[in-house]
Amino acid sequence: MSKKMPQENDAKSADLARFLQDNTEQCLTTDQGLRINDDQNSLKAGERGPTLLEDFILREKITHFDHERIPERVVHARGAAAHGYFQVYESQAHLTKAGFLQNPAEKTPVFVRFSTVAGSRGSSDLARDVRGFAVKFYTQEGNYDLVGNNMPVFFIQDAVKFPDLIHAVKPEPHNEIPQAASAHDTFWDFISLMPESMHMIMWVMSDRAIPRSLRMMEGFGVHTFRFITAEGKSRFVKFHWKPLLGVHSVVWNEALKISGQDPDFHRRDLWEAIDNGDFPEWEFGVQIIEEEDEHRFDFDLLDATKLIPEELAPVQRIGKMVLNRNPDNYFAETEQVAYHAGHVVPGIDFTDDPLLQGRLFSYTDTQLIRLGGPNFHEIPINRSVAPVHNNQRDGQMRQAVNTGRVSYSPNTLGGGCPMQAGADRSGFVSYPEPINAQKWRGKSEKFFDHFSQAALFFNSQADWEQAHIVKALQFELGKVEAPAVRERTVGMLAQIDPTLADRVAEGLGMAVPVTVELPLNRSVPADANAKDYQPKPVNPSVGASPALSMANKPADGIRTRKIAILAADGVDESAVTAMQKALAAAGAQSRIVAPHGGKLAGAGGTFIKVDHSLLTTSSVMFDAVYIPGGPHSIAALGNEADVLHFIQEAYNHCKTIAATGEGCELVAASFGNADRDGGQPTAGILLGRDAATDVVAAHFIAAIAQHRHWSREMKAQAPA
Ligand code: HDE
């Protein structure tokens, strides 16, 4: 009998149980099941002798190791994923025949992978970047992949520009610098020549590109898709994911520091939340556009650089997704999962969006190089729960042992199997969209309104959000060395909003160019049949869309937020306990941060476990800070430069800071008279010198729920 390791034995559960009972059976073996006697020494000629080529055990082990890496994804290489389920609230039969959207009692398993786009597999989670939000639904009708992003639009309108975009943003080819960053010449050179990218540029320069947590991001299908009913009626649909924890971001200075402190910040946050039973949840939303309204808008529904403002087509929340299980093995699941924009089920169909159409080719092609052959659908994470029957055979790493001699259709020798389902047995039927057109290389006129929705986005942001966009552009363009690239980009920004361009130019110490050099690719003669449309100025009717601002997302309590409690020996332990209790009751997590690890001796003689020494963490790892009293504790903390920096940095990042007892003196020592701002209390600073801890805790919790206190940002700041 073979002596496989239990985890490799996925079929025979009785064998597995027996193996688990009897640990002595778990001997180390070769891949052929041969028991290994000695795994510490290679086979040698004599005590000091040369290693023998004969050592097949050594060779098997090293050979496997040499082949352990596969090509990383060309984009979205860095990711983190989780298992969960999706449930529809009520039948959507009036919109689509998709099986997983019919029955509220049915839970459809999902596997969701979040990612950054530009960085390599080992890059930081906190890069300024769009995040991938890819959901694989394992439905009874086959796998459905909604391969989206955390931003509702994209840089380019046509798939043919994708390799150019990615080449431009990736590290520059001569020196492979910079890693996971768009702040360099080639990216902005490309962008400055692509006016269609301006709307997406507003999004990636906003704080949406530096989320507080993957659990606090929206998700979007980006393209317009179709829903098809059982009667064959088609409607246009845009897909949304709305996180129940709200939509929150960090600030750029914080992102830079988190990248050093914990490059796995998002990955760890997702893992720990699921491990703690704080399961991330999103509602699934749809915007529906009737077929007859296709041309109702100023923009083209097929243009992926445009969104449909929620004020024009409300997002209907039709179901919920819960992520409740971490992967068992990163490589087997998160790395080997293969999403594809073309994995659809009956009831969901494509539109002619030229970006989407190109994606339908790309995803299978990329899996072939990444996963090594055409059988990647047999890797456990990619397997459909619906039975698979077809005449595909053979190929690299084929797992299925197909029996019989028939591998073609039509056949009689195999009883005609597998048979075509036909539409009446829910076989997939493409929507019969009528097409009567000339071939050409070009786009419709509405695609050329590049600036109106960029202006819509900018106009819809709160003051602090606009300020962050301006700063981000100053940072990115400040890293650009070629003056002409900076000028062209600022000229492009002036097309969106002259005040935006002025503010960015001021920070760069340059003037806004009076005329914008037209992008090079526009000077190329158009296809003989195509019309030569030019970029249009901002549509004067553009207003604001409140749904686009994070400031308008509903407040959502402090569930899963992380709060630092700064303490040293002699801390007032009753204050610590009262605060910990209040925070835990609100669903938050508190951590004791102290000058040393191990335990603290409280003023009353009890010991408190330290979670982090000051060396191993910093304020950027937390959402808020509490400083309890205790004269000895405060005296000790006051001697630590790291403590003062911790408090100042939390202040500068607009986080909530609370103190009780002598803790208030430490806050004052950190940045002067911080609780007063022109006689008014400073937002988010709660000092309760003589107040009961639970009273301070109630205010603290309410203040943390606001996420950040942006009014502080406009004031002069201590250096962080
Ligand atoms: Fe992708 N994209 N993409 N993309 N994409 C890939 O497929 C591609 C686009 C998105 O966690 C690749 O398996 C082209 C838009 C996500 O595994 C590749 C174009 C959107 C992920 C590919 C686009 C996305 C990918 C690389 C322009 C948002 C990660 C590895 C037409 C709607 C999925 C892979 C995961 C991954 C091609 C544009 C989302 C090369 C050609 C727009 C979330 O096939």
Image: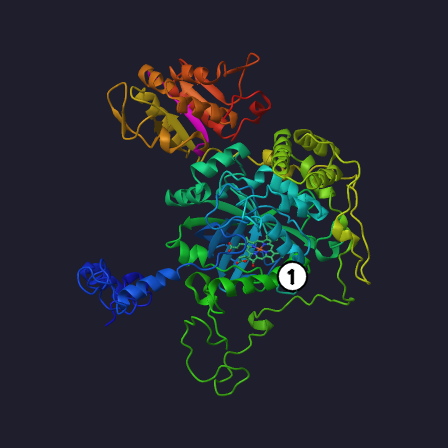
In the image, residue 164 above or below residue 211: below
Q: Residue furthest front?
A: 49
User: What percent of the width, then of the height, locates residue 51?
Assistant: 25, 63
Q: Is residue 158 left or right of residue 626?
A: right
Q: How is the image coloured?
A: rainbow
600 or 595: nearer the viewer? 595
Residue 659 sits inside the magenta stretch: no
- Ligand 1 is in which quadrant of the figure? bottom right
Q: Is residue 296 visible?
A: no
Picture quadrant where residue 715 is located: top right
The secondary element bearing badge 1 is classed as helix
314 or 600: nearer the viewer? 600
Residue at left offset 45%, top offset 71%: 396
Q: Please report the bounds of the magenta region as a residue range.
A: 621-630
Q: Is residue 615 left or right of residue 259?
A: left
Figure quadrant of the N terminus? bottom left
In the image, residue 79 above or below residue 545: below
84 or 491: nearer the viewer? 491
